[in-house]
């Protein structure tokens, strides 16, 4: 189980470890490979409309770990999830008794893909039980007509290990994940707003589930992108700087950028008055990267008149929707933003009801706190 003392702030797996610390280690093998388009679409088809009704299902144990929440709802809306952590050593270092069924992908490097074997059919049976075999079979039989999701690459994999080392940047650290992008889902979010935490404070509480990659000093992007700092530079202007004796491109923006997902277990606060109607949209057409760049260049200020945290949701290249926080405490800071936004706007728990302790040394936003191996 390990040390769970976080100075009063619970670790991501504190609830899970407390209940599972006496159980045998989980099998370290995979049942689902979401790294390729065909496999991802087969899984997506099989999970459409699916809810998990069995409290003893391994799906519930997985999501209890992700959300640090032993009481994720029954029936659990599996069909809503589009973000999945990989079953790597780091996962089992945190959740030794919780089986992760998702195969590691080739990136980020160094990959553990080749070292994780497929599970025996008996180990996968309970994972497949709530899924729709007919949906999966139809997707595989009509692959070209059924390519409704793509496997996201942007914001997820970072630079290669070779590039990082050449630039004096650290290797990838954290829990790698796969994000599946679906056009119809993005259109729904654009029209109706991104989904809020279920039953949080104020009936959703203004907490949006997100993913975030450190754009500054962890090697997730070729450029060094400074976010959240009030700067005298023209927003979006490119500079050259030196990092560990290496010249790198440098950009600076006042806003703080996140991508809306379901399945990360990390939430940021956008205000209890948040709706699609009172949010400034910079685009309504998927795959319009120019508006995302425009947002970075000019700094995003919206929702100020409604008195809530300024937020803009927009489309970003690759098909993700950015949740941009354009005011304090996230933006206009004296200290640049790396992996972790300010603690007061971060939460975990299925209903965003628990505090989140983020570990800054990881490449992706997280709630693993001080327990990260």
Image: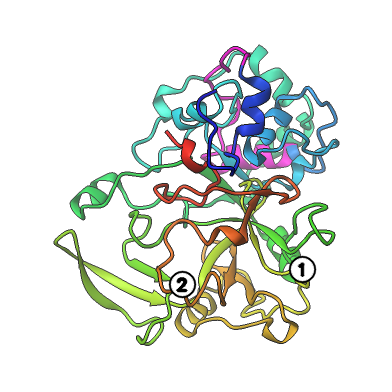
Q: Which residue is mark 1?
A: 272
**In the figure, is residue 346 to the left or right of 278?**
left
Q: Which residue is mark 2?
A: 228
Residue 334 in percent (x, y) is at 41, 74
Q: Is residue 53 visible?
A: yes
Residue ID at (68%, 62%): 186
Residue ID at (40%, 26%): 114
Magenta span of residues: 22-46
Q: Work out which residue is located at the far front of the displayed protein and give it.
A: 7
Residue 336 in percent (x, y) is at 40, 68
Q: Is residue 106 above or below residue 61?
A: below
Q: Is residue 176 visible?
A: no
Magenta residues, dominant SS class: loop
**In the figure, is residue 160 to the left or right of 215?**
left
Q: Count neighbours of disc 1 (C-alpha within 10 A) and say few if under 14, some if 14 to 19, many if 20 or more.
A: some
Q: Work out which residue is located at the far left of the displayed protein and give it.
A: 245
Q: Is residue 333 above or below residue 30?
A: below
Instruction: Give me the disc on residue 16.
Output: none
Residue ID at (72%, 41%): 45
């Amino acid at each position: 189980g390990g040390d769970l003392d976080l100075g009063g702030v619970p670790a991501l797996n504190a609830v899970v470890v407390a209940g599972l610390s006496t159980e045998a280690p989980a099998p370290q093998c995979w049942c689902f490979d979401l790294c390729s388009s065909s496999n991802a679409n087969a899984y997506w088809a099989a999970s459409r409309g699916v809810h998990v009704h069995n409290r003893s299902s391994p799906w519930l144990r997985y999501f209890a770990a992700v959300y640090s929440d032993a009481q994720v709802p029954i029936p659990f809306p599996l069909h809503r999830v589009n973000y999945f952590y990989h079953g790597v050593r780091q996962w089992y270092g945190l959740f030794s008794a919780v089986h992760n069924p998702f195969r590691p992908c080739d990136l980020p490097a160094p990959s553990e893909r080749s070292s994780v074997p497929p599970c025996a059919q008996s180990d996968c049976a309970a994972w497949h039980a709530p899924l729709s075999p007919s949906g999966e079979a139809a997707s595989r039989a009509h692959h070209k007509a059924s390519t409704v999701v793509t496997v996201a690459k942007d914001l997820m994999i970072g630079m290669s290990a070779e590039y990082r080392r050449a630039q004096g940047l650290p290797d990838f650290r954290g829990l790698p994940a796969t994000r599946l992008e679906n056009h119809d889902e993005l259109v729904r979010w654009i029209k109706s707003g991104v989904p809020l935490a279920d039953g949080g404070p104020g009936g959703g509480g203004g907490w949006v589930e997100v993913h975030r990659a450190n754009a500054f000093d962890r090697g997730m992007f070729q450029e060094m992108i400074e976010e959240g700092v009030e700067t005298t530079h023209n927003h979006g202007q490119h500079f050259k700087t030196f990092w560990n004796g290496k010249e790198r491109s440098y950009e600076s923006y006042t806003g703080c950028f996140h991508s809306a997902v379901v399945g990360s277990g990390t939430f940021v606060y956008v205000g209890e008055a948040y709706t699609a109607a009172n949010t400034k949209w910079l685009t309504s057409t998927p795959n319009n990267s120019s508006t995302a760049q425009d947002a970075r260049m000019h700094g995003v200020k919206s929702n100020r008149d409604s008195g809530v945290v300024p937020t803009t949701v927009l489309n970003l290249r690759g098909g993700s929707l950015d949740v941009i926080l354009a005011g304090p405490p996230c933006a206009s800071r004296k200290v640049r933003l790396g992996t972790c936004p300010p603690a007061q706007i971060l939460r975990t728990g299925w209903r965003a009801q628990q505090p989140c302790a983020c570990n800054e040394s990881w490449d992706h936003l997280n709630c693993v706190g001080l327990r990260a191996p």
